[in-house]
Image (cartoon, rainbow, N blue to C red):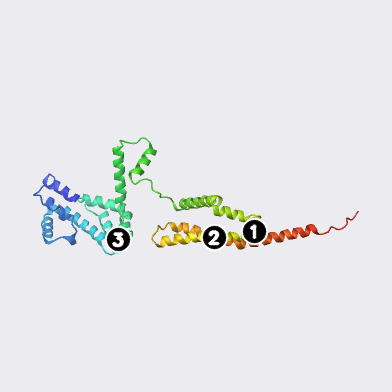
Amino acid sequence: MKGAAQVQQAICGHRGRKGDPLYAARRTLSTGADLLNDKQKDRLDTLFADDAHVEVEVTWSVYQRMIAAYRHENRRHGRELMARLIDSISTGVPKALVEITKLGRTLKKRAADVLAYFDRPSTSNGPTEAINGRLEHLRGSALGFRNLTNYIARSLLETGGFRPRLQPWIRMSLIWTASVHVRTIMRRYMPTNIALDGLRSRRGLKWGIPAMLLSIPYLYTASLLTALIDSGAPRWLFAFTVILIWDAFKFIAMGPVSLVALLHVRAAESRQHRALRRPVGPLTHL
């Protein structure tokens, strides 16, 4: 406790030694009041009975109030206790209590950050301090950086590497762009899509019904993959199973679709032939 160290220096003229009361009670002063045993309580009573240790007693009481606020089971009540403590030590503190005055000024300035702990339990600046420590170590081992780009790159590598932390809208944009490119490549180069493009042509419509038989090997392969997955095969095979079933569905659906399209083409050709065979009437001369 910093206040005890300063009082120790003022009273004895030196830092804590083995026989000094404040030095002997340094661990007891940092222990919560609800965790003290009888021996520690007697040591504190003896310590605070000396008028020279009044500043230490006041500092210890403030410390205990702070611990009680943090350890309270009800977060809302703990926040109220901490707010009262900040208000009580931020103004009206005797000038002799230098450490309490500094603490009150700091807590008053950062009251929002201190009280935010009770709104978001178990938060800490420990990770931030750990990263700062890694950066300080990097700066010392590298003997300084003259290039900001190199400093940023080395800092990222030192503190965890380049991780895919993208904004949601950027991530969705990349996923959509990648899916469009994959769909274009599959439509252009997949054998199934090439066959379907041939069936959609005017000459290939007549092969729509026989092409439904091409769905059989796809469905058979999908059933084999399903059996492998059930027996413990990797789950990523399920993606291939879905693709095979989807290709089989394309061939099955292409049969009736091509039949309807073929009938429509034949009807259009029939109407065109009838129009060509229709006799033309005599020309009328003006």
Which of the marked residues, 1 or 3, is nearer the chain's N terminus? 3
Is residue 91 visible from the viewing direction of this image? no
> Whole-Å distance between the Cαs marked 2 and 1?
17 Å
Pointers 2 and 3 in contact (CB under 8 A)?
Answer: no
Residue 171 is situated, as x and y percent measured from the top left of the image, at 46, 51
Total numbered labels placed on residues in the image: 3
Please tell me which residue lies in front, 255 or 179: 255
Residue 174, numbered circle: none
Tell me if 71 is positioned left or right of 190 in this view: left
The residue depicted at 16 percent of the width and 48 percent of the height is 5
Is residue 247 visible from the viewing direction of this image? yes
Q: Secondary structure at mark 2?
A: helix
Dot 1 surroundings within 10 Å: few (below 14), some, or many (20 or more)?
Answer: some
Which residue does the numbered mark 2 point to in the structure image? 215
Which residue does the numbered mark 1 point to in the structure image? 206
Q: Secondary structure at mark 1?
A: helix
Q: Considering the image in quadrants, where does the C terminus appear?
A: bottom right
Q: Secondary structure at mark 3?
A: helix
Residue 127 is situated, as x and y percent measured from the top left of the image, at 31, 50
Tell me if 274 is positioned left or right of 12 in this view: right
Q: Quadrant of residue 203?
A: bottom right
Tell me if 147 is positioned left or right of 210 in this view: left
Which of the marked residues, 2 or 3, is nearer the chain's N terminus? 3
Disc 2 marks which amino acid? Ser
Disc 1 marks which amino acid? Lys
Residue 106 sits above or below residue 263 on the image: above
Which residue does the numbered mark 3 point to in the structure image? 79
> Whole-Å distance between the Cαs marked 2 and 3?
68 Å
Disc 3 marks which amino acid? Arg
Pointers 1 and 3 in contact (CB under 8 A)?
Answer: no
